[in-house]
Image: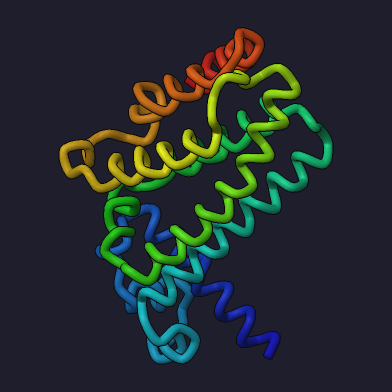
């Protein structure tokens, strides 16, 4: 059982590396098998479909990121520090990932459904996060953060689904869109901390 778990993890890590380097559709099960010196049959025994491999990859990415933020948050209660660390991870991930990875995701309905479910849970947590940010003086009091979360959900969806924007990197989208929105919900105190983050990362 432990051996099977190790093989599954090796498959996920190899697939993660290749999906992010070349895009999802460009990578075959043969490529993954060759990368870790196992048979394609072994992969199919662990993951009957490529979509299941991709599900494993994304689940692992999310779990590692959540664990990192949980550990980071155990050392600080400062909302802006936590937000900036989340953004830093996203920027770092995107900088090391082929844009085809993100455009290919929408071609896998089950994976898309999984990510929508995860994002819905994150939005539930985000409301308490916003309230804490208001209490700490970083976020504006005059914004309905439930409405804001609904709008942001659709903004992200439109950006991902718009083919005319496929040539833009995450960094370009962040600087020219996401960062403007973040500044918009921040107080002067929040903007000051966010500007420091921008200077450090761009």
Quarter holding the N terminus? bottom right
Residue 174 position in % (x across, y down):
41, 28
* Residue at image location 42% in from the left, 68% down from the top: 54
Farthest left residue in view: 164
Residue 122 position in % (x across, y down):
58, 50
Above or below for 100 versus 152: below
Tell me which colouring the rendered structure shows: rainbow
Residue 24 position in % (x across, y down):
32, 62
Above or below for 6 versus 188: below
Quadrant hosting residue 32: bottom left
* Residue at image location 55% in from the left, 57% down from the top: 61
* Residue at image location 35% in from the left, 30% down from the top: 173
Quadrant hosting residue 121: bottom right
Q: As drawn, is 122 to the left or to the right of 71?
A: left
> Can residue 76 be seen at all in this image of the molecule?
yes
Towards the viewer: 140 or 8? 140
């Amino acid at each position: 059982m432990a051996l099977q778990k190790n093989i599954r993890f090796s498959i996920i890590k190899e697939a993660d590396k290749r999906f992010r380097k070349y895009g999802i559709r460009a990578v075959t099960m043969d490529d993954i098998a060759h990368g870790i010196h196992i048979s394609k049959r072994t992969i199919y025994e662990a993951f009957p479909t490529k979509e299941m491999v991709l599900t494993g990859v994304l689940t692992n990415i999310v779990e590692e990121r959540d664990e990192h933020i949980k550990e980071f948050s155990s050392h600080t209660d400062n909302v802006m520090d936590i937000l900036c660390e989340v953004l830093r991870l996203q920027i770092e991930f995107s900088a090391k990932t082929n844009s085809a990875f993100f455009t290919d995701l929408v071609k896998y309905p089950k994976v898309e459904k999984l990510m929508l479910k995860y994002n819905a849970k994150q939005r539930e947590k985000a409301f308490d996060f916003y309230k804490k940010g208001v209490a700490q003086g970083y976020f504006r009091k005059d914004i309905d953060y439930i409405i804001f979360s609904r709008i942001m959900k659709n903004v992200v969806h439109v950006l991902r689904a718009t083919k005319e924007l496929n040539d833009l990197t995450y960094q370009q989208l962040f600087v020219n869109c996401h960062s403007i929105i973040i500044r918009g919900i921040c107080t002067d105190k929040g903007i000051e901390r966010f500007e420091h983050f921008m200077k450090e990362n761009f």
